[in-house]
């Protein structure tokens, strides 16, 4: 049942990523040309974000396809973790783009160039429409996959960039203040950093096999210990193979009057599922002497 669900979810995410990638790639070319012609750093910084969108969406798409490969003799857990590697790469890419924009803005503050505000505004509005469509496509899958969430965050940050460019173009048209272009570019670069940091932290936590977000390890341990058949527990580990696919392994020392070991194991599995959403478990039962039950 889980495998069929994962396959269906992966297929849907793949379709969303393909559509968003096609839209974004076409508009990237338009925005780069427009940024060079208008000499707008805000527009070029938005194009830089758009480039990371294209790269991120392409990587996310490849990751979804690879993650669907079945387990084999070399990868007994399958290829789920590849999606997390893609999410971490996308976050790192966004950090580099933000750093580049800040550096370029500093350069332009020294000598603001002349900027053509009307073409800049037209391209930014078109970019906003593309971003909104892509966000709508990816929004449904961002809570199912950290990889898709990374791609969504990239498009979301680019949408903010498009809004910033629109505001800058209007101000430049009305006032002639060319420095506003660099201020908006800095704002675009700074705004995305905290959200990118959260994505990087979450993906790094999975790669380090940390306790998944939303799982209270203390409450989980207390719940298992509270079962009347349990004398003690040790070697409790909870981690995630990928976003939404958490795994637990635990050794349980049972009391002497355990009774049916298989029935007790099923009770533990039911507890893990109902209270903590953990469906992939390895439960080792031991008696007080340390022998398997």
Image: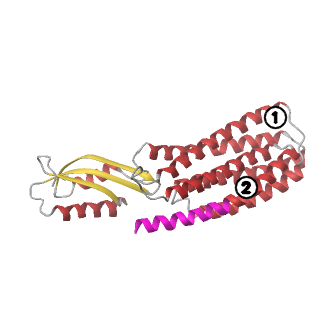
**Among the 4 quarters of the image, the one containing residue 105:** top right
Residue holding disc 2: 25
The magenta segment is 1-20
Residue at 80 percent across and 51 percent down: it is: 31
Horizontal side of residue 124 vs 60, given as left or right = right
Residue holding disc 1: 108
Q: What element carries label 2?
A: helix
User: Which x, y percent locates residue 89?
Assistant: 58, 44
User: Which x, y percent locates residue 268?
Assistant: 25, 60
Query: Which SS type dominates the magenta stretch?
Result: helix
Q: Is disc 2 surrounded by few (<14), some (14 to 19) or many (20+) residues within 10 Å?
A: some
| Quadrant of the frame with the C terminus | bottom left
Looking at the image, which is closer to me, 241 or 159? 241
**Among the 4 quarters of the image, the one containing residue 159:** bottom right
| Quadrant of the frame with the N terminus | bottom left
Q: Can residue 10 be seen in this view?
A: yes
Q: Which of marks 1 and 2 is nearer the N terminus?
A: 2
Q: Is mark 1 on a helix, strand or loop?
A: helix
The circle drawn on residue 224 is none
Q: In this view, does 223 lie above or below 6?
A: above
Residue at 51 percent across and 43 percent down: it is: 201
Horizontal side of residue 51 vs 280, given as left or right = right
User: Which x, y percent locates residue 15?
Assistant: 61, 65
Check residue 12 for magenta coloring.
Answer: yes
Q: Distance between the residues labelled 1 and 2?
A: 27 Å
Residue at 65 percent across and 38 percent down: it is: 96
Q: Is disc 1 surrounded by few (<14), some (14 to 19) or many (20+) residues within 10 Å?
A: some
Q: Is the Cβ of the residue at disc 1 closer than 8 Å to that at disc 2?
A: no
Residue at 63 percent across and 64 percent down: it is: 137
Looking at the image, which is closer to me, 79 or 232? 79
């Amino acid at each position: 049942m889980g495998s069929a669900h994962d396959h269906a979810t992966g297929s849907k995410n793949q379709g969303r990523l393909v559509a968003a990638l096609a839209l974004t790639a076409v508009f990237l070319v338009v925005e780069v040309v427009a940024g060079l012609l208008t000499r707008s750093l805000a527009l070029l910084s938005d194009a830089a974000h758009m480039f990371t969108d294209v790269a991120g969406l392409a990587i996310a798409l490849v990751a979804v396809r690879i993650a669907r490969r079945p387990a084999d003799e070399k990868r007994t857990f399958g290829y789920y973790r590849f999606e997390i590697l893609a999410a971490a790469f996308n976050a790192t890419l966004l950090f580099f783009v933000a750093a580049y924009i800040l550096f370029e803005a500093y350069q332009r503050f020294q000598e603001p160039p002349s900027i053509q505000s009307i073409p800049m505004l037209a391209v930014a509005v078109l970019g906003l429409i593309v971003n909104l469509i892509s966000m709508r496509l990816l929004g449904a899958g961002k809570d199912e996959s950290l990889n898709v969430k990374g791609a969504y965050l990239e498009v979301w940050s680019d949408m903010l960039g498009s809004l910033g460019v629109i505001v800058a173009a209007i101000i430049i048209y009305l006032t002639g203040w060319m420095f506003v272009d660099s201020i908006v570019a800095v704002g675009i670069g700074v705004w995305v950093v905290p959200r990118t940091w959260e994505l990087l932290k979450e993906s790094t936590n999975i790669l380090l096999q940390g306790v998944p977000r939303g799982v209270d390890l203390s409450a989980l341990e207390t719940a298992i210990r509270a079962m009347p058949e349990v004398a003690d527990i040790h070697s409790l580990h909870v981690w995630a193979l990928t976003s939404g696919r958490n795994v637990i392994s635990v050794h349980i020392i049972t009391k002497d009057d355990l009774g049916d070991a298989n029935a007790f194991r099923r009770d533990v599995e039911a507890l893990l599922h109902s209270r903590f959403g953990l469906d992939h478990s390895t439960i080792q039962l031991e008696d007080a002497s340390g022998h398997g039950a």
